[in-house]
Amino acid sequence: MTRSETDVAVAGKGTYRFPQPIGVHASATVVGKMEAEGPFGSAFDRVMPDDLFGERTWEQAERKCLLSAAELALQKAGLKAADVDLCLAGDLLDQLTTSNFAARNLQVPFLGVFAACATSGATLALGAIFLATGLAEWVLVATASHHLTAERQYRYPVELGNQRKPTQHWTATGGAAFVLGRAEAGLPRLTAVTIGRVVDLGQRDVNDMGSAMAPAAADTIRRHLQHMREQVEDYDVILTGDLGGFGSELLVELLRQDGVEIEGRQQDCGLMLYDRTRQDVHAGGSGTVCSALILAAPIYQRLADRRLRRVLFVPTGSLHSVTTYQQGETIPTIAHAVVLEAGDLP
Amino acid sequence: MFLWAFLLGGAMAALAQLLVEVLPVTPAHVLVGAVVTGAILGGLGLYEPLVKWAGAGATIPLPGFGYALAKGVVQEVHQIGALGIFTGAFKATAAGIKAAIVFAFLAALVASPRD
């Protein structure tokens, strides 16, 4: 298989266009009860019966979510793990234990990727680059998160019964996976990516991460449109990750100050995953899997049947740790952008 | 006294809720702040009137725990001198702390955490 330089065009620092698009052959999702009861509940493939998913600990349950989604995606694509050239996965837990431990079962060349809640963007971008440069024919991308493991690590174990604040997010529980390969007629395609820069405007409040991440999303969206010489109107929707209500408002305002108007064209996965009038999720969903679930299920379906033509997927992540927070540091954040398009008509 | 107990307890809770919503504080901040406030007021003798007036409405909430700590220290110092600074607080609150630990342990035996 030969590839030339024209298979990846560098449109700007960190922005790569793929003249030979990447095909998203399959996507698969596993979700917890809260997510299954949300507005898109019926779009997900499998629902966990409870928090433990038949395992002894929530950490093990999180691994099972990632593995189940990965195996289901491979099944849908008609592949076995042995067919896959590379697996890219990430999660929120220290040392990426969820991804690393789950990868034991896959026996595929593996790279763990940490980008907090922007992991789905980072892994899809890297996967696309490996495919476009001819280094891989099939790439498996996966992520998982779990509300209770995130609470245990980042805040307090839920046994303490601490109160949650209105600006806090609800870490989504579940796993999502994608199989990337060569483009084929009819398949949703990945045509460009913009790798984000770490942005830190001095925000310190871990109970309001949406506001910390909005500047990163603004930076990436602006750079992407500039490098690609495109307008907001070239996309049906700009889909941010976990900005929530407060973060989304801030993002619209930040971009407006730069002359980029996204109001009416921006949606946030954290606000889409749950029904905030019925479900007590405060500012909305978050976690690596929140944006991945929305992309893998309702968005993928709408790209497949061409209800959506062109989507700019911009998940965002907060790159702090419990230690840096306790030491009084600010919260650096990042956002990675991926362009997904409906496939050619067969 | 029931009415005052209800009103004071509720007022302290409402004040804590207000701080939680307005300031970037964590549950740990609230816990420590409440106990320390009670200890300071207790040490200055300003909490005693609240206890007389509202009873359990002053002793049950967290500032009441701080008050018990301070009161214990003052009593022990009067009885045995300077060493009371170290032993007084534990003597006064031992029963409460022990009860919390024992009940938490019993709860952990019968229940599992879940969402």
Image (cartoon, rainbow, N blue to C red):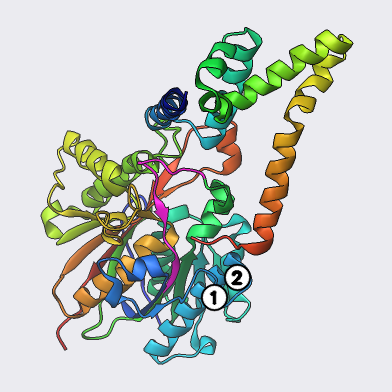
* Amino acid type of the residue that numbered disc 2 sits on in the rendered structure: Gln
Q: Report the chain holding disc 1.
A: A
Question: Label 1: which residue?
Answer: A64
Look at the numbered discs 2 and 1 and tell me whether their residues touch, using CB distance below 8 Å: yes
Residue B27 lies, in percent from the top left, at 52, 36
* Quarter containing the N terminus of chain A: bottom left
Magenta stretch?
A: A162-176
Judged from the image, the secondary structure of the residue bearing numbered disc 2 is: helix
Who is closer to the viewer here, B101 or A58?
B101
At a point 79% along the width and 26% down the height, the residue shown is B91
User: Would residue A171 be counted in the magenta stretch?
Assistant: yes
Which image quarter holds the C terminus of chain A?
bottom left
Instruction: Kindly identify which chain the residue marked by label 2 belongs to.
Output: A
Q: Name which quarter of the figure residue A185 lies in.
A: bottom left
Are there few (<14), some (14-19), or many (20+) residues within 10 Å of tag 2? Answer: some
The residue that appears at 21% across and 51% down in the rendered structure is A225
Q: Nearer the viewer, residue A113 or B65?
A: B65
The residue beneath circle 2 is A60
Q: Secondary structure at mark 1?
A: helix
User: Residue A54 at x, y = what percent?
Assistant: 56, 78
Q: Quadrant of residue A248?
A: top left
Residue drawn at x 46%, y 77% as measured from the top left: A49
Image position of A323 with respect to A273: above or below? above
- Pinpoint residue A13: horizontal percent, then vertical percent: 35, 50
Secondary structure mainly formed by the magenta segment: loop
Do marks 2 and 1 share a subunit? yes
Name the residue: 13% across, 44% down. A261
